[in-house]
């Protein structure tokens, strides 16, 4: 689908956005609310007629949804004018083989305007300026103490690692190999858990060691590729086992395992942890 390139070109003014697989997420730091945008399927296999937007709360579930059709926003008006009789209009498909992205020739102005209007009404906090400084006591603890001896930091990293494993498990329901999910996990941690990018990388690394059962090293890439080559159900089982091992590991501020987490339904992104 060339989703990352699509959303780069869409150029949404949301400072909290990142792309995971074929899905765009936006989530303010330390917020339980996130925006999810994916391609809206038609009744035809691997064909899409627009974007599906959802504002989701980590605890209360879906708050608002919208289906923005390409036809309604002039996305492919110019492209379709050149098509012959009988050609499908106002849609894209991911089975193209001409080397171009399926949305080639799109005018994304109308879609961008509609998405911004939706966000401003449904979740105005998503368009607030982003602060990478993360002001407040958490930032002070990070900068003024040694992170490896700070129990608050260690607990947050532990929870961030769990979030990475949840993300990897959710991706398997969408047919996404774990290597693809892990490639973007640090940004997911930054937006969903509220940790800086470097700590997101630490959470990635901890998740990889749980998945592979070995320390990071020259053979880590091969181990991950072997896992990624397995059928999705086997990848999911490995991630679930890694998640159970990690969840059972005590953290400095937690003396008992955390509550059981709901398993994401097929095609559903895992909910962000809230503290």
Image (tube, helix red, strand yellow):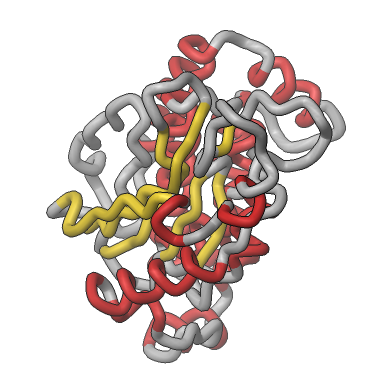
In this view, the residue in front, 243 or 245, is 243
Q: Is residue 136 left or right of residue 16?
A: left
Q: Which residue is drawn at 41% across and 40% down?
A: 40
Residue projecting furthest to the front? 85
Q: Position of residue 272 (x, y in %)?
A: 33, 52
16 relative position to 121: left or right: right
How many numbered discs?
A: 0
Q: Name the spot of residue 149 as percent of width and height, x first.
A: 51, 67
Q: In which quarter of the image is residue 29?
A: bottom left
* Pick the front one: 179 or 210: 179
Give the x, y percent position of residue 67.
32, 50
Q: Residue at x 45, y 53 (%)?
A: 160
Position in image of residue 191 (x %, y %):
46, 64
Which residue appears at 20% of the width and 34% of the height?
260
From the viewer's side, name the closer residue of 42 and 127. Answer: 42
**Residue at x 56%, y 9% (from the top left corner):** 231
- Horizontal arrangement in the rendering, residue 89 relative to residue 212 (left or right): left
Query: Please, is residue 147 above or below residue 179 in the view?
Result: below
Task: Give the quarter of the figure containing the N terminus.
Answer: top right
Q: Could you say which quadrant of the image residue 117 lies in?
A: bottom left
Residue that sits furthest to the left in the current view: 60
Q: Quadrant of the C terminus?
A: bottom left
């Amino acid at each position: 689908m060339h989703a990352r390139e699509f959303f780069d070109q869409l150029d949404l003014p949301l400072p909290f956005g990142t792309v995971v697989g074929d899905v765009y997420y936006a989530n303010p730091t330390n917020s339980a609310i996130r925006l999810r945008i994916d391609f809206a399927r038609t009744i035809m296999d691997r064909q899409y007629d627009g974007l599906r937007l959802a504002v989701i709360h980590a605890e209360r579930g879906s708050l608002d949804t919208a289906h923005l059709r390409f036809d309604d926003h002039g996305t492919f008006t110019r492209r379709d004018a050149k098509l012959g009789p009988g050609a499908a209009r106002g849609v894209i498909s991911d089975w193209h083989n001409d080397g171009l992205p399926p949305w080639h020739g799109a005018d994304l102005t109308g879609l961008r305007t509609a998405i911004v209007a939706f966000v401003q009404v449904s979740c105005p906090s998503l368009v607030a300026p982003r602060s990478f400084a993360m002001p407040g006591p958490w930032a002070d603890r990070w900068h003024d103490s040694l992170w490896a001896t700070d129990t608050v930091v260690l607990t947050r990293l532990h929870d961030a690692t769990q979030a990475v494993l949840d993300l990897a498990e959710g991706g398997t329901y969408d047919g996404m190999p774990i290597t693809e999910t892990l490639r973007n996990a640090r940004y997911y941690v930054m937006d969903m858990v509220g940790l800086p990018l470097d700590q997101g990388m630490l959470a990635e690394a901890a998740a990889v060691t749980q998945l592979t059962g070995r320390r990071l090293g020259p053979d880590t890439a091969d181990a991950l590729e072997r896992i990624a080559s397995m059928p999705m159900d086997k990848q999911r089982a490995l991630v679930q086992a890694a998640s159970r091992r990690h969840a059972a590991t005590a953290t400095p501020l937690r003396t008992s395992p955390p509550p059981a987490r709901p398993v994401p339904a097929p095609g559903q992104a895992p909910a962000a942890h809230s503290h």
